[in-house]
Image (cartoon, rainbow, N blue to C red):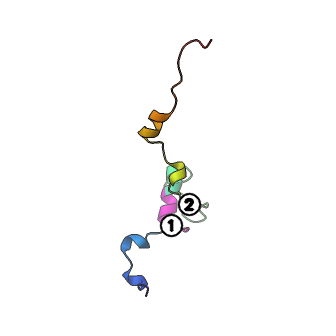
Amino acid sequence: MSLHRSLVAKTALKRHRNVLTRAERIQRLEDEGKWERGESVFGLPKVRLRKVKAGGKHHAKPTKAKEEEAPQVAEGPSE
């Protein structure tokens, strides 16, 4: 049996949104230097929202154990 939507944990309700409020759009445009205070809030340009993907096992940084296993390159003249 599944849980009712209203009973789901609050953190699960925070999802990626495709639509920003006008205030959020203005804030992003201000940060990018594309809008200044005093300008009209109507006809704002579109603001892209990029969903950041979490890095999985394929994008993980190598651990110290793996770094120690890597062959050491000798410095100096190669003859």
Q: Quadrant of residue 12?
A: bottom left
Category of crowding for the residue at label 1, using alpha-carbon neighbours closer than 10 angstroms: few (below 14), some (14–19), many (at least 20):
few
Residue 53: percent from the left, percent from the top? 53, 57
Secondary element at tag 1: loop
Residue 32 placement, left or right of 64: right
Q: Is residue 38 visible?
A: no
Residue 32: percent from the left, percent from the top? 54, 50
Looking at the image, residue 22 lies above or below residue 58: below
Residue found at x 57% / y 51%? 34
Q: How many marks?
A: 2
Residue under label 2: 49
Q: Is residue 39 visible?
A: yes
- Of the numbered discs 1 and 2, the one sitting upstream in the chain is 1
The secondary structure that dominates the magenta segment is: helix
Q: In the drawing, what numbered circle is on residue 16?
A: 1
| Residue range corresponding to the magenta coloring | 18-27
What is the CA distance from the residue labelled 1 to the residue labelled 2?
9 Å
Residue 43: percent from the left, percent from the top? 61, 64
The reply to whether callout 1 and callout 2 are in contact (CB within 8 Å) is: yes
Looking at the image, residue 69 lies above or below residue 31: above
Q: In the drawing, what numbered circle is on residue 63?
A: none
Q: Amino acid at mark 1?
A: His
Q: Amino acid at mark 2?
A: Leu
Quadrant of the frame with the N terminus: bottom left
Residue found at x 48% / y 44%? 61
Quadrant of the frame with the C terminus: top right
- Magenta region includes residue 43: no
- Front residue (pair 27, 40): 27
Residue 44: percent from the left, percent from the top? 59, 62
- Front residue (pair 24, 11): 11
Residue found at x 43% / y 73%? 13
